[in-house]
Image: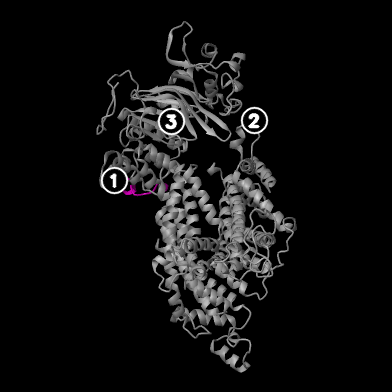
Amino acid sequence: MPDMTKTEALSTEGAVAPVDAIAPVTHEKPRSLWGDAWADLRRNPYFLVSSVLIFVLLLIAAFPGLFTSADPTKGDLVHHFLTKPELGSIGSPDWFGYDGQGRSVYARLIYGTRASIIVAVAVTLIVTIIGSITGMISGYFGGITDAIISRITDIFFGIPFLLGSMVVLQAFTKRTVWTVVFALAFLGWTQITRVMRGSVITVKQADYVHAAKALGAGTTRILFRHVLPNAMAPVIVVSTIALGGYVGAEATLSYLGLGLASPTISWGVDISAGAAQIRVAEHILLYPSLMLSVTVLAFIMLGEAVRNALDPKLR
Amino acid sequence: MITMDNTSTVPSPRDGNPQTPLLEVRDLHVEFHTRDGVAKAVNGVNYSVSAGETLAVLGESGSGKSVTAQAIMGILDMPPGRIPQGEILFRGQDMLKMSFEERRKLRGRKIAMIFQDALSSLNPVLTVGYQLGEMFRVHQGLSKKEARLKAIELMDKVKIPAAKERVDDYPHHFSGGMRQRIMIAMAIALEPDLIIADEPTTALDVTVQAQVMDLLAELQRELNMGLILITHDLGVVADVADKIAVMYAGRIVETAPVHEIYKRPAHPYTRGLLDSIPRLDQKGQDLFAIKGLPPNLLRLPTGCSFNPRCTVAQDICRTDVPLLQVVSEQDGSELPGRASACHFWKEQLHG
Amino acid sequence: MGRYVARRLLQMIPVFFGTTLLIFLMVYSLPGDPVAGLFGDKGTDPATLAALRHEHGLDLPIMQQYWNYISDILFHFDFGKQIRSGREITDVLGSAFPVTLRLALLAFAIEMVVGLGLGIVAGLKAGKLADNLVLILTLLIISMPVFVLGFIIKTVFAFQLGWIEPNVSNNETWGELLTPAIVLGSLSLAYVARLTRTSMAENLRADYVRTAVAKGLPKRRVIGVHLMRNSMIPVVTFLGTDIGALMGGAVVTEGIFNVKGVGGLIYDSIIRREGLTVVGVVTVLVVVYLVASLLVDLLYAVLDPRIRYA
């Protein structure tokens, strides 16, 4: 992706140019928008922290067995849920204590990561693809196409997100990770459509797009070589931040009893169970909540770091 | 020298000595602290303006001409900007040592500024009448109604047609030339002693440029104001300026009365600028252009900043910084107001 | 201006019908039969079921059901009856909406005052300590799902410190609603603060602000008149659409603090498959949302004279 835009920037420079051509090449290597952004990101502590967090989360989601030897589904009533956490025993099943059925809270945290990550990543991918395409068509072609797509977007946007997802989920008798993905993506794509549309409208008016048109480039070529790469930046930022939001949304739905349900292991499911026992054992609620918040935080921090790096105005 | 002062509501510090110029900049340095290091934008600038006098400051973008002006106005972004040394004397008083309130009261009332891009420099959500009237409301305590009448008067003065009808329009309703007239009206509202015009005509059509320049010159004469005209356009300068200061890489490289510089530049950079003006009598020939780019302010070249682009540079130019020194005729007689910062000014001037 | 309003109103019509139809279809694609559900596991004879279905109009084609439903609302202000209890849905809504509306308004007031305040402080001190504190605080709030925040506040202030009652009583006094309102408004509060901050910090560098300083205006005038008006434009847009979002998002907060409002109503209705109630609530929320966005557009035009009414 960054490479594509880099070549893009170079090829368009040639096209715009008589004005700039007078100025001879700089002595220093010119940095593209993305190159500049990367230089900025590497020094941003928020970016570094969030990248490490996300890397670890992905690792946990992929290989939960690496992080705990305990079985998250096996309850042993020897460990009554009143068994408090032993924070000294880092990484052992006792670390965060046990839940009402004597299962290790720590093991369930580790194994619950996968559901959250899969849901959030899948929803983000789906809404980004649908939203980008609809937004690009709407913004680029304008007129009646734009009016129709915009009204459809308005319609989906008009339904409150959480309520709508609850209704969609209720339509499934058997709820899996994929039904939750469907419910969230069903109403989620409008956000990306709007961002993409706005971004494309701005880019469309840029001189290099006019230049490409003047040089006789076809619509497809203009869309995918010139408009899309330059309009993508805000979408990437919004998608990354939204990814964090979907982690939270999945947990919220599961907490309400409408998302994932036992025996699927998920933070939301555990938080829901913990909420019932909040007065006797806070730790059942506390640790999944903490894990959830840290995950959301990591993605939001990443998204914001990227946004700040891409926005020259903020430098 | 005659000074007019109609804004005597608050007595300003002024001494009767006509030798004291209106504004004097002494050894001014400005630097910007950026992510990539310290950019030295202004490196020891000296210039002065008297009442009724026009100083043209000439230079490429990045030469420090606008930064100097912003330092005078006190509108530099600090941080990242910093003024490590120098003095800016207004009627003999160092503005850099004044309190925030003292400086604020000078701004707009005694020293006003006209910006290059009137569209972005006017507030898009306020009517021009409001923005003009604000000067009177804030500095003279007029009521809203009185201020509005004054605004109409001002718009008439800068020759905006149908001022009364247009006073409640927003900036985006006006054409580029009209907007620049509004900027000028705002600057002369309180009949200041000094106006700094930062590329006032660059953003305008050529046909409108002359009108706006004429208006500015006319008002300057009428009010006997000092004018600092910042530009990169040698053509604009010739008609209105009394003296010229050429800036390069944050330094003044040459000063001269306006007409002499066209005849006999004393610095290779000035010569390059003059040679790059397209001329009708040289039709068909290649245009001259100064080679290379303005220097990187983060890493100024050693010696003379212009040496990498200079056609006559010698070894000394790469090691020793040339100071701005008074130049003279071959027979040693004085050339008033002339100075050059070139080791080889004699060759340039007389060669 | 008049034409602009008319055009916006015209645009709202398809959105109103589209949204209500969409939610209607979503609700009616739910599996399970609300009528059969009435009789529990034992079931009843098919004839009774058919009669009941006919009584509720459930045997008609779906589009006709929608049309009957929406025309009843539009022409008779009749939202239908709950199947289980037989109560008029307008009654049910009438008792639940005021509570949620009050909760949402309180949350709105909190997010506006605190969010704007924090945002202005951070924007004016961009890059300084205060700015960083606001950024970190809002980042934490945004990262914390509402139910997590709700439980933290409930645990700390109700269970451990005993300052508040854990549950809101049926009188729903403003004082009782304060804590739930803080929880409900927290996310938007963080967004408002950040939006204000970014907008202020960006406009602080605008040319017209530099002009205002060069005019010798006092600082509070530069900020209060020149900076604020321009900076408020994006914030107003957000605030306007948020009042509807707050009401729709109250499900979780109302559950945690046991507030008997729209959230609880819609949750129960979804679980019990009271389709008409769900559609009714969403319809009202859609109207709130549409009216709010129209108001925002008009306010926007007042704030920003550059908007053209084409």
Report x, y in % for residue B62: 52, 30
Q: Name the subunit of mark 2.
A: A
Residue farthest to the top, as pictured: B331
Report x, y in % for residue C252: 53, 67
- Say which amino acid is labelled 2: His
Who is closer to the viewer here, B282 or A217? A217
Which residue is disc 1 drawn over?
B148
Q: Is residue B165 magenta?
A: yes
Which residue is disc 2 drawn over?
A27
Q: Name the subunit of mark 3.
A: B
> In the structure shown, which secondary structural element does the residue marked by tag 3 occupy?
helix
Report x, y in % for residue A291: 62, 57
Please state if C252 lies on the left or on the right of B103 as rendered: right
Q: Residue at x 42, y 29 (%)?
A: B229
If the image is split into quadrants, where does the N terminus of chain C sit?
bottom left
Who is closer to the viewer here, B180 or C133? C133
- Residue range (magenta): B163-172
Within-10-Å neighbours for mark 3: few <14, some 14–19, many 20+ = many
Q: Quadrant of residue A21?
A: top right
Within-10-Å neighbours for mark 2: few <14, some 14–19, many 20+ = few
> In the structure shown, which secondary structural element does the residue marked by tag 2 occupy?
loop
Q: CA distance from mark 2 to mark 1?
A: 53 Å
